[in-house]
Amino acid sequence: MSHIKPYNHPSLGKKEQVRMMFNKIANTYDFLNHFLSLGIDIVWRKKAIAMLKNKPNRTILDVATGTGDFAFEAIKMLKPQKIVGVDIAADMLKVAQQKIEKKRLGHLFQVTLGDSEQLPFEKEQFDVVTVSFGVRNFEDVKKGLENIYRVINKQGTVLILEFSRPSQFPIKQLYSFYFNVVLPIFGRLFSKDNRAYQYLPESVYAFPDGKRFVALMESVGFNEIICKPLSFGVCTIYVGSKC
């Protein structure tokens, strides 16, 4: 799926274009997330994080952390000792840092620029690595998963929340209309970026969801994988162990 890119810039790879896109929409990202999902994204995050409650979770790495919403929810629900957020878009991290300062969580939650394929951490450093709606934006998904596997402790856990494609009538048809017609219109109106919310459905349809993604996780070493669809398959939680 590396050929799906936000913009038509032949000289720039997917990674650079994704960075450019998120820097452009950083200031409207949170509003649009909640508005365009009708707030269901908040429920999805809570359901995903709840799956970590009975697993070691003292140290957490949140890859593609964006503005930090997933990490903040993890702090509330799991009470970790430390959480680090990594993202390639500096402007998204600026928003996250503002939230950290406002919530006075600087002692617990730090953010840093980083690339999923070259995570700036030693091996086996975190109990949990999470990725919320970010894996489909990796330039090389397998390489990103391999890097995630590297930094997870033995007996640790990866949790990935990602969009998927519902297959049942009429959810499939409603989903297609909303994703391909409604979402780009409102995204363009509020974000002032003509491509960002056209790229979203394109990247979702290109993503190897469900059993294909489970197979990819297994190929890099994860096992005991749980694949849990939410909202009739609109998104899916993937949980894997490193044993």
Image: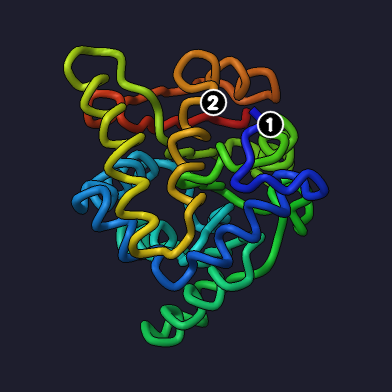
In the image, is 34 to the left or to the right of 202?
left
Q: Which residue is mark 1?
A: 3
**Count of marks, rendered view:** 2
Circles 1 and 2: CB distance less than 8 Å?
yes
Q: Is residue 114 above or below residue 219?
A: below
Q: Residue at x 27, y 57 (%)?
A: 34
Q: Residue at x 58, y 52 (%)?
A: 63
Label 2: which secondary element = helix
Q: What is the quadrant of the N terminus in the image?
A: top right
Q: Is residue 129 above or below residue 215?
A: below
Task: Count neighbours of disc 2 (C-alpha within 10 A) and say few if under 14, some if 14 to 19, many if 20 or more.
Answer: some
- x and y percentages locating residue 69 in the rendered image: 39, 62
In the image, is 124 to the left or to the right of 83?
right
Q: Which residue is mark 2?
A: 206
Q: Amino acid at mark 2?
A: Ala
- x and y percentages locating residue 166 in the rendered image: 31, 20
Label 1: which secondary element = loop
- Point out which mark residue 178 bears: none
- x and y percentages locating residue 236 in the rendered image: 37, 30
Nearer-the-camera pick, 4 or 58: 4
